Amino acid sequence: MASTATPKPAYAPADAAEPASAVGAGSQTLMRGLDLIECVAHEMQTLGELSQKLDLTKSTTHRLVSALVDRGYLAFTPRSGYRLGPKLLELGFLAQAQADLIQVARPHLESLAASTEDTVHLGVLDGDHALYLDKMPGRRRINISSRVGDRQPLTSTGLGKALMLDHPPAYWSERFEADQAAGVPKADSSIWHARMAEYVAEGRAFDLEENEDQIRCVAAPVRGAGGKIVGAISVSSAAQYMSNARMATLSDEVRHAAQAISRDLGWVADT
């Protein structure tokens, strides 16, 4: 006759757990340690609070947090509790340094170029210009004159506008006046500023033949772990392939690609 077993809780106290292999026990200890780190990621927690949240005995919790404090992954403040330790700050800087923007973005750019069949760019803010870091050619027989290393005006390019979405309107006006003195963008000031306000609300920007005749693009910002804009991507094509309807549809795809790159860089969307 088959017997029934009572399911164990997700975090069974260590002293009540069934015997496990060395590998299994080690994995369980590792996961509990990671759970403890995640528990204090947003606010300090006392030993009792951690024990209750993870369904562990206080003795097991104390053993785990003591080991994490010794290694620098947690820090302890008397009468307040546990918080993230200096080791995590060090590892965070190392992880950010290893997350090279071009390397992280490349597979997303390739995928976007393949799905849209249009030219895809990656750029960053370089002083008061947009610097093109990478370019994926499309499949259409269209010559997009941009090159990696080019510096383009912020106010006339989709990339440039996307890079400015978090800047105050006063900065937009300053750049618009300077670029107009240099011959771009080909737009009325009031219309251009109204569009910028719309771009902020939509989380993306357009180039409506302002930088190059018969070339349009859809761009979106890329954010780093701290939430700041660290770059932008764009999809560019001839105006005949970029009707208003297609640009509206393409906006979601470009935004999603930019958000995917942002997540790979450590960005977490506000909930």
Image (cartoon, helix red, strand yellow):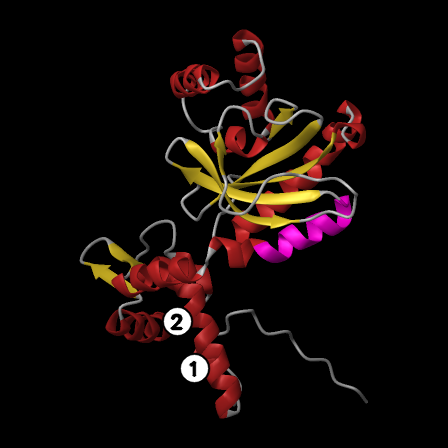
Provide residue 99's location: percent of width, then percent of height: 45, 59
Say what secondary structure mark 2 lies in.
loop
Q: Secondary structure at mark 1?
A: helix
Residue 18: image location, x then y, percent: 53, 86
Label 2 Cα neighbours within 10 Å, binned few <14 / some 14-19 / many ≥20: some
Give above or below for 240 relative to 259: above
Q: Which residues are magenta?
A: 106-117
Most extreme residue toward the left is: 78
The location of residue 143, given as percent across then percent down, is: 70, 40
Compared to residue 58, the image places residue 22 above or below, namely below
In the picture shown, does residue 206 fall above or below 263?
above
Q: Which quadrant would residue 209 be assigned to in this image?
A: top right
- Residue 57, which numbered label? 2
Q: Look at the image and tell me whether residue 230 can be seen.
A: no
Q: Which residue is mark 1?
A: 15
Image quarter where the N terminus lies is bottom right
Asked whether the viewer can see residue 81, the reply is yes
The three-letter code of the residue at mark 1 reads Asp
Q: Are marks 1 and 2 in contact (CB under 8 Å)?
A: yes
The answer to which quarter of the image holds residue 85 is bottom left
Q: Nearer the viewer, residue 154 or 7?
A: 154
252 left or right of 157 in image:
right
* Between discs 1 and 2, the one toward the N terminus: 1
Query: For this rendering, which residue is in front, 253 or 69?
Result: 253
**For the residues marked 1 and 2, what is the alpha-carbon distance in whole angstroms?**
8 Å
Residue drawn at the location 43% of the way across and 17% of the way down: 169
Dominant SS in magenta: helix
Left or right for 185, reference 14: right
Q: Is residue 76 magenta?
A: no
The residue depicted at 68 percent of the width and 36 percent of the height is: 236
Residue type of the residue flagged with mark 2:
Thr
